[in-house]
Amino acid sequence: MMVLDKYRVKFTFKTTENRELPLILGQLQIFSKKAFQKDYFAKNPLLISVSSSPYVIASFDVSKKITYQRNPNYWARNLPSRKGQFNFDQVKFEYYKDETVALQAFLSGVYDWCIESMAKVWARGCVGKAIENKEITKYLIAHKMPSGMQGFF
């Protein structure tokens, strides 16, 4: 690794065989110099790290929920590849430790997006007014493949 300037570093690889390695390095978090002091993370376990994303953390309740606010200073907001994306001013995620409670919250309209990966639960557990009123739609995707398929689309 070579430091090019205050804002850039360059990684040089010995071979070109591992085409995934540059992508993995691109996922590395950026930390301040303070982060490498002894016990820094032990003393600051909930520290919000440096970010350059379209959203910033507005609030959180550990192990329960996190709320993101749109970042008005997002550096890439006007790039052609970003047009039409990140349209919500606020995005909230609520965590459910119990899958049954999470499914019931979804079926009750507490949240509006759910991935159910167990076909049995989707076939037998997803019942109620939201299904009857077609607020939530269940689809049977027929195919002629010899392997089984399950999913929520």
Image (cartoon, rainbow, N blue to C red):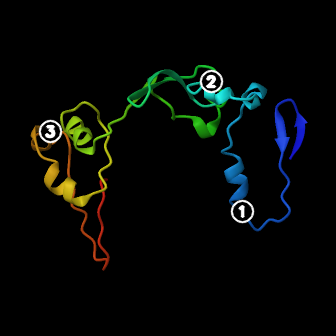
Above or below: residue 12 compared with residue 75: below
Would you say residue 126 is visible in this rendering? yes
| Circle nearer the viewer, 3 or 2 | 2
Instruction: Out of 8 and 96, give the one closest to the viewer.
Output: 96
Instruction: Out of 75 and 83, give the one closest to the viewer.
Output: 75
Above or below: residue 140 compared with residue 40: below
Residue 60 occupies which quadrant of the picture? top left
Secondary structure type for disc 3: helix
Percent coordinates x, y for residue 39 in the rendering: 68, 29
Q: Amino acid at mark 1?
A: Arg
Residue 14 horizontal side relative to residue 133, left or right: right
| Circle nearer the viewer, 1 or 2 | 2
> Whole-Å distance between the Cαs marked 3 and 2?
46 Å
Q: Amino acid at mark 2?
A: Lys
Location of mark 1 (residue): 19
Residue 65 horizontal side relative to residue 130, left or right: right
Residue 135 occupies which quadrant of the picture? top left
Mark 3 and mark 2 lie on one chain; the one further toward the N terminus is 2
